[in-house]
Image (tube, rainbow, N blue to C red):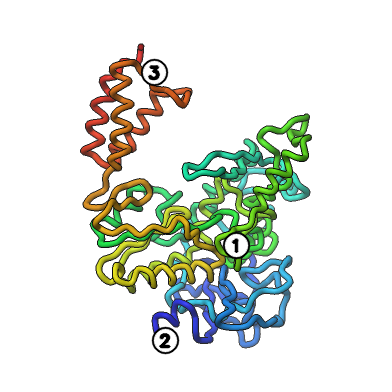
Amino acid sequence: MGFLDWLFGRKRFLPPHTPPSPVGPRNPNIPTISESGTAPVRPPAGGQSQSGQHSLGSRYNPRILRPRRRRSSRPREIDAGKSEHLDRWPHDELDRPDPASLTLPAPRADWVPLGDQSALAALLGIQPTDLKYWLVGHHLDENYILREIPKKSGGTRLLMAPMPRLKALQRQLQQALVSRLPLSPSVHGFRRRHDVLTNAAVHVGKRVVVCMDIADFFPSFDLRRVCGYFRWLGYSRSVALSLASLTTADSFNARLAKGRGRTGLSSDWTERNEVENRCQSVNKIHRTSPLRYRGYRLPQGAPTSPGIANAIVWRMDKRLSALARRFGGDYTRYADDLTFSGFEKLAKHTRMFIKLVEKIVHTEGLAINRKKTRIMRSGRRQRVTGVVVNRQTNLARRDFDLLKAILHNCITKGPSTQNRSNHPNFREHLRGRVAHALHIGPERGAKLQQLFNQIDWSR
């Protein structure tokens, strides 16, 4: 099988599905991991349908195969990557890579098995009756607050911030379960001992750097996809659906940040409809795969959303990393920012490489925001996640000059004259910016640290 056949699945095959660990009560038709943790144990012949072995996140490609409805010998909710709410699922058998290279790592020793909802309630430190309260009705949606923050590039970003009680549950779930999900080595965002510097250090001194952005990253993962991922890991249907319900939300029932009344819901339906129209905005970049905010999706602002999103796109990271190695380059991802870098081969075939990346991302159920695609050659400044990577990791000259001017004015005129954004703790704000510059570029950061130490904060 050729490399392009591996990437885009031009040949029919039935991949041996390998979940990371036998967690909780398993269906005998679902394959499990052997005692060595490497080779999967196949179920008896005829026990599992082909539709139950579809991997999560694949998309139907109309150029390769027309959609066909496949009947399964068992209920749809048992199939990995699907839920009971699906009426039909695209035939994506030709959009899967070679399964031998996509086997999940061996299960971790500290993995927490969850047999039923009582075990999930014990994991969260609450009673089973309290867990049912959160899962029934719109109690979860009403515990989110909608906020809009401005973007640097223009426009606004919609945030759904959970309220304190729900945030405490999600943080407990993040620490006990989500943080232990298998991730690709290419992931540097929302991960321990990884940051923007580790993401940018991989691309230092390269001939060409390509930066791409995924449109509507968190809202792209709806409830059925999150539930299907936990079913794929081996959890029972009730536990997987409970986990998906705790980590997704519908913006229609969320409270507005400027709500009025006892419940916090806005009484001005014109204002509420304006927010809903922004929530339901269709992605205009790729009309072939529209992405909407409406419905139960990963909320941007919840503690569990980054970890779950990173885990679901594990296969996409493996495919993009293999594509980059094929062109003699490297690949990293920080949240929704995809970065590729390489030398002569990648610099010569950059346009073709970008089309291949867009096709892989599209088959994984996502879309590339083409307006944010940047190609940076070695003759110009190469910047990755705010870090200059031409010869070494360093702070951008413009950012250095701006921060240096602020510190100089604080020394000569006093800190109170420079707090134009009205930060409640301007001293710690400047300390954090200087520490970030010192972390990225030690030489320039040391100069800024000397200026910060000369400020008289009593003025």
Residue count near mark 1 (Cα–Cα under 10 Å), binned few <14, some 14–19, many ≥20? many
For label 3, the residue is 417
Mark closer to the chain start, 3 or 2: 2
Taking the view exactly as shown, the residue that stands out farthest to the top is 459
Q: Amino acid at mark 1?
A: Phe
Q: Amino acid at mark 2?
A: Met
Q: Residue at x 77, y 50 (%)?
A: 136
Residue count near mark 3 (Cα–Cα under 10 Å), binned few <14, some 14–19, many ≥20? few
2 vs 1, front mark: 2
For label 2, the residue is 1
Near-viewer residue (134 or 379): 379
Near-viewer residue (140 or 230): 140
Near-viewer residue (180 or 227): 227
* x then y, percent, for residue 409: 31, 21
Q: Secondary structure at mark 3?
A: helix
Mark closer to the chain start, 2 or 1: 2
Residue count near mark 2 (Cα–Cα under 10 Å), binned few <14, some 14–19, many ≥20? few
Instruction: Give the CA separation, mark 3 to mark 1.
Output: 53 Å
Point out which mark residue 230 bears: 1
Q: Residue at x 44, y 82 (%)?
A: 5
Instruction: Indicate whether 356 appears above or below 203.
Output: below
Point out which mark residue 56 bears: none
Q: Amino acid at mark 3?
A: Thr
* x then y, percent, for residue 429: 40, 28
* x then y, percent, for residue 403: 32, 31
Q: Residue at x 29, y 42 (%)?
A: 395
